[in-house]
Amino acid sequence: MEFQYPDGRVERIRKAPVNTRRGAEQYERQVRQSLLDGSYGKEEKEVPTLAQFEREFLAYSQTNNKYSTIKSNRDILRKHLVPMLGRKKLLAIGYAEIERFKANRLDSGLKPKTINNILAVLAACFQWRRNLGW
């Protein structure tokens, strides 16, 4: 579908969640209305906390990794990441939070290599979530 804004810009939208003609036409009407309102593409998606996302990530991990990696991911999430960062929304975990996490873990006696392994699991969570269309 091509939509022409009142200022002359043209935007092409190519997706319909329904494979029927009636459903596609209804979806087109909704998209055209949201384009006119200026709300198209600005829908806020629910961003889970790390604790909420843990189960989803572990399910993904089980289907795509070997047993030792699954066990390691589960242990790292439950022992290190969820207790410290579990209440934060995924989008709220930034550079400052990660640096505080690293300093806290160093103070608790973990070696830098262990901390890097923990951060690798956090990075895998972010990467997989990004691949889902985050």
Image (cartoon, helix red, strand yellow):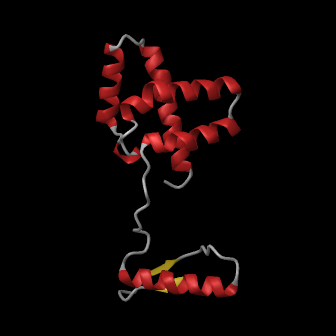
Q: Could you say where residue 125 lies in the image, as x and y percent from the top left? A: 51, 39
Closest to the observer, 112 or 87: 87
Indicate left or right for 37 with 11 as reference: left
On screen, residue 61 above or below 114: below
Count of numbered circles on the image: 0
> Which image quadrant is residue 14 in?
bottom right
Percent of width and height locating residue 88: 36, 41
The picture places residue 74, in percent across and down from the top left corner, at: 56, 29
| Residue at 60% over, 73% down | 15
Instruction: Report the front residue among 13 and 31.
Output: 31
Q: Residue 59: x and y, percent?
A: 63, 41
Q: Residue at x 34, y 39 (%)?
A: 94
Q: Can you say whether 48 is above or below 100 in the image?
A: below
Q: Is residue 20 left or right of residue 128?
A: right
- Image quadrant in which the N terminus is located: bottom right
Is residue 14 something that shows in the picture? yes
Q: Is residue 1 visible?
A: no
- In the depicted view, which residue is nearer to us: 87 or 1? 87
Residue at position x 51%, y 48% from top? 130
In the rendered view, does 7 fall on the left or right side of 18? left
